[in-house]
Image (cartoon, coloured by chain):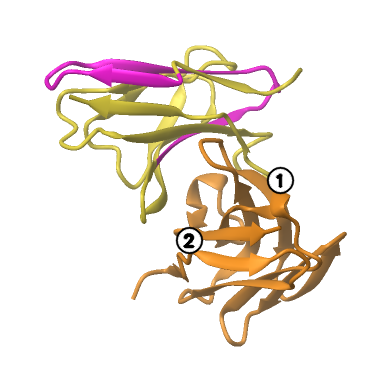
Chain colours: A yellow, B orange
Amino acid sequence: DGGITQSPKYLFRKEGQNVTLSCEQNLNHDAMYWYRQDPGQGLRLIYYSQIVNDFQKGDIAEGYSVSREKKESFPLTVTSAQKNPTAFYLCASSIDGRNTGELFFGEGSRLTVL
Amino acid sequence: QKEVEQDPGPLSVPEGAIVSLNCTYSNSAFQYFMWYRQYSRKGPELLMYTYSSGNKEDGRFTAQVDKSSKYISLFIRDSQPSDSATYLCAMRFYGGSQGNLIFGKGTKLSVKP
């Protein structure tokens, strides 16, 4: 089945540790996105990539890093510089960055910092 | 004033009721308007999208855009318990990328049998 796979679904980390969230899509989409969702805050864009080897910062990129070495993969690293990393992280893709078509979302990764 | 305002609810209705969900926005340059549905602990899925003003209907769902009032609505007819979810509005400019999509905070809906 085509779709977006995020892993792990739940992740716990200690303060000061970096953690990488995986996002893989087999939809052959050019564009991929990372959002953060907090209670009462809605979805906020962290990073997005419209094409392989290119990505742009979103509204809340500080403390995060990404790479886009392959079309199907867009991992997100939450670094120790992120002040409040506990959140629900959503990866999404779209056919391309400018199409009016829909965003397809993964099922999310819930990160808890202990 | 935030760009997109959405009442977080929660909204509780009996099965069969007509549900009205709304968002207001401040930027008149928004041209594409979307509604996403998000079940608990899942990712959002696109429910409806419209371009500029007008209505769009899909089964029990109707999306309305009133650009003069900067107001969008999603109506759900004959609501079902399976409609219980959080509904997120989203919008962006003409010619902008999906990276410019602005989301509302979501309205949590509960449909009671």
Q: Chain of mark 1?
A: A
Please tell me how crowded label 2 is: few (under 14), some (14-19), or many (20+) other residues with Cα within 10 Å. Answer: many
Residue A12 vs B92, above or below: the answer is above
Which residue lies most toward the top here? A70
**What is the secondary structure assignment of the residue under circle 2?**
loop
Residue A101 is tagged as 1
- Seen at 59% across and 16% down, the residue is A72
Question: Residue at left 33%, top 27%?
Answer: A111
Instruction: Please provide the residue range marked out in magenta.
Output: A9-36
Q: Is residue B27 above or below residue A83?
A: below
Task: Look at the magenta stretch and give its main secondary structure.
Answer: strand
Residue B62 percent location from the top left of the image: 78, 68
Q: Which residue is identified by label 2?
A: B104
Q: Quadrant of residue A29?
A: top right
Coordinates of residue B53 in the picture (x, y in percent): 72, 76
Q: What is the secondary structure assignment of the residue under circle 1?
A: loop
Position of A7 relative to B83 (above/below): above
- Disc number placed over residue B30 in the picture, else none: none
Q: Chain of mark 2?
A: B
As rendered, which of B84 and A108 lies closer to the eye? B84
> Rounded to the nearest whole Å, what is the CA distance between mark 1 and mark 2?
19 Å
